[in-house]
Amino acid sequence: MGVGHKAENQAPGKAGALIVAATPIGNLDDVSTRLQSALRRVGKVAAEDTRRAARLLESVDARARLVSLHAHNERSRIAALLRGMLAGEDLVLLCDAGTPGISDPGMRLVREARNAGIRVTPLPGPCAAVAALSVAGFPADRFRFEGFLPARRAARLARLEPLKRVAETLVFYEAVHRISAALEDMRAVFGGDRKAVLARELTKLHESVHGGPLDELCREAQSGAIVAKGEFTLVVGGADEARGSEDAAALDSALKVLLDELPARQAARLAAALTGASRRAAYQRSLDLKRSKQAAE
Ligand code: SAM
């Protein structure tokens, strides 16, 4: 395994490592070569659902012993797992799908292992939030992962309310039976114009990535046009993105009136003064508008 990890509390030299491994979110071909060899090499795998993990192990011809580790037994299992690693055993940690710890169990074991000076190393791979962000077309240089919203409406609205001013792209996980209600509440809080992308069944046979203003997505969810089946990740444009499109619409309206009367440079100068846009952006946009007008004539 790699070098350069120095734990705060160094465990004995012979200690094993905790390998936090991501698994496919729907397509078994996304099992990496590294994951295959780690699963074949280690003696023990801690998994959220051992039956599901058994299928994965079988598919790569791995024979490790499976230990269940889920939200309800994580605390009680940790001591024994740490003992194994301190005695020299490498342990792979898996969740049902995607990356452990991301809206899934694993954080406690990782924390305790690190506290015990055990080397904790990632075996990176699929994560639904990142996969959805990568195809949503919203800025992801900064984003905010919000995981699952509360099941009750009042609590959900209370969680959404402060998010309406958040500038960055927002990412939510949502269960299929709540997708419509979540979209409705987002529309109520963020406004119907806010753009969002619904990523469904990523990497699977019926994958779909569908975007539009929340108004439209709500209508489609109600009419059944968005299939009410499968796994969903919802990406919502941040407040800056929404403001950006309002600003762009205001600049376009001003330019359209001014370009009927004035040359592009003058129209751009006035439109910039009226809307707060930069002169350069206004001039560039005035040329685009002129070109599309000429093309339409
Ligand atoms: N740890 C996982 C990860 O890294 O992606 C997430 C686990 S969380 C319990 C499961 C949620 O992830 C689902 O309810 C859904 O919102 C989202 N999800 C999982 N697989 C997905 C897929 N193939 N397409 C879209 N969303 C998915």
Image (tube, rainbow, N blue to C red):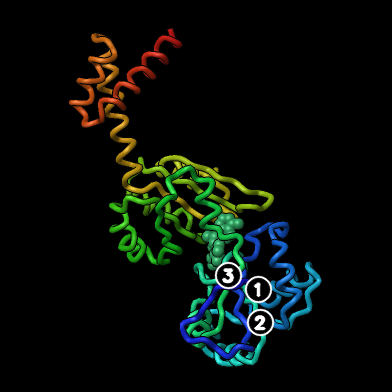
Task: Confirm or reject: label 2 Cβ below 8 Å from ligand 1.
Answer: no
Give me the C-alpha separation between circle 2 and circle 3: 13 Å
Residue position for label 2: 90
Image position, residue 94 (x, y; %)? 62, 73
Residue 89: x, y in percent? 67, 86
Location of residue 294 (image quadrant): top left
Q: SS at mark 3? A: strand
* In the displayed structure image, the side of residue 193 where residue 102 appears, left or right: right
What residue is shown with label 3? 122
Residue 196, position in %: x, y?
A: 44, 46
- Amino acid on which disc 3 is placed: Pro
Q: CA distance from mark 2 to mark 1?
A: 10 Å
Q: Is mark 1 within 8 Å of ligand 1?
A: no
Amino acid on which the number 1 mark rests in the picture: Met
Q: From the image, tell me which residue sits under label 1.
A: 1
Q: Amino acid at mark 2?
A: Asp
| First in sequence: mark 3 vs mark 1 | 1
* 253 w.r.t. 188: above or below: above
Say which of 82 and 167 sits in front: 82
Residue 256, image x, y percentages: 29, 17
Q: Earlier in the sequence, mark 2 or mark 1?
A: 1
Residue plotted at (73% across, 57% down): 29
- Is the residue under label 1 in contact with that under label 2 (CB below 8 Å)? yes
Name above or below for residue 5 compared with residue 118.
above
Q: Quadrant of ligand 1?
A: bottom right
Which picture quadrant has residue 67? bottom right
Name the residue: 66% across, 58% down: 26
Among the 4 quarters of the image, the one containing residue 62: bottom right
If the image is split into quadrants, where does the C terminus sit?
top left
Q: Nearer the viewer, mark 3 or mark 1?
A: 1
Q: In the rendered view, tell whether residue 79 sits above or below residue 294.
A: below
Q: Cα distance, mark 3 to mark 1? A: 11 Å
